Amino acid sequence: MSTEALIQVIASGLLMGLIYALIAVGLSLIFGLMDVVNFAHGEFLMVAMYATFGLWLVSGIDPVLLAPAVTALLFVMGALVYLGIVRYAMRAKANIGMVQIFATFGLAILIQGLSQYFFTPDYRSISNTWLGGHTLNVFGVYLPWPQIYGGVISVLVFGGLYLLMSRTDFGRALEATREDQGAVALVGIDRNRVFALGWGLGAALVGIAGAVLAIFYYIHPQVGATFALIAYVTVALGGFGSVFGALVAGVIVGLVEALTAVILPSSLKAVGVYALYLGVVFVRPSGLFGRL
């Protein structure tokens, strides 16, 4: 392989890795806040993609400009899911972990079934966008503008998350709740309110990712499952609950996937990712940045 081709592979893997990190960070945030794995995370992504498609179809506005509206919609959806489902699942007297798993898994099946009923299993795509079909040539390395946009958005989102967590009262309350849910009640912090806002924030993050993906990826009822598996591996690799770990792991997953596609057939590109994760599990079961 030539140096130019290797740089092309690495650049493509890096950009997709940043998008994977953006997809996964909301899942990691919710787990770190409540020790709950949202098995409907992929379906949240699918809803965001369909929302982007629907708003584009109705208004004709480019998806880049629709991203804030989709993000706000997913924030409301996430908060309502907590208030209407997860909050009650957490009150289970026995087998609380299984109750939470089946509650979110059942929600995933419901969302996917409704999407098939209303939108049919047909593949859909957004055409004639500002970024779609355009590439940037950097000394012979071709970078698609949608992936560049997604990578830039991912970096900005992680920067915003850092500022939110470290510089705002809500971020401090969120971090305090992550550290000790019982102690925060003693200082007057409403745990349920923080949980609802945390779920809203986690869903909003995957909403941004969905708005980005809708620009260059096909939209269909099973699209969430495709990226949910990558998100779970990314979160587990980086360490459940670690926002910074999700960023690093997402980049690693993107790079390994891209390099594996060079060595093996493209249909087997995920093999390298899962092999890497299994290797890390044996050495550090909690993930790269997870707590032991």
Image: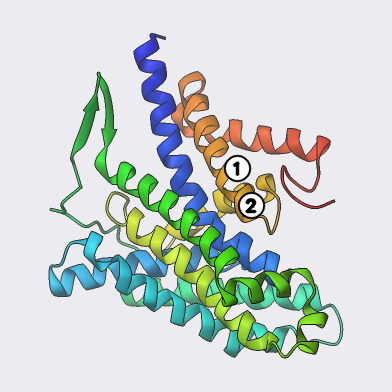
Q: Which residue is mark 2?
A: 235
Q: How did the renderer colour the structure?
A: rainbow
- Quadrant that contains the N terminus: top left
Residue at image location 25% in from the left, 19% down from the top = 139
Q: Position of residue 188 (x, y in %)?
A: 72, 91
- Please say if 284 is above or below 187: above
Residue at image location 52% in from the left, 61% down from the top = 163
Compare residues 245 and 228 and report the one nearer the observer.
Answer: 245
Residue at image location 56% in from the left, 52% down from the top = 231
Q: Position of residue 125 (x, y in %)?
A: 24, 56
Determine crowd level at label 1: few under 14, some 14-19, many 20+ residues with C-alpha closer than 10 A.
Answer: many
Q: Please say whether residue 268 is visible from this viewpoint.
A: no
**Location of residue 16 by image quarter:** top left
124 left or right of 272 in image = left
Q: Looking at the picture, which amino acid does disc 2 mark?
A: Val
Q: Please say whether residue 138 is visible from this viewpoint.
A: yes
Q: Looking at the picture, which amino acid does disc 1 mark?
A: Ala
Q: Which residue is mark 1?
A: 249
- Please say if 68 is above or below 232: below
Compare residues 219 and 175 and report the one nearer the observer.
Answer: 175
* Mark with earlier residue (1, 2): 2
- Please say if 167 is above or below 229: below
73 left or right of 227 in image = left
Residue at image location 20% in from the left, 47% down from the top = 132
Label pair 1/2, CB-CB below 8 angstroms: yes
Look at the numbered disc 1 and give the secondary structure of its residue. Answer: helix
| CA gap, disc 1 and disc 2 | 7 Å
Q: Position of residue 176 (x, y in %)?
A: 72, 73
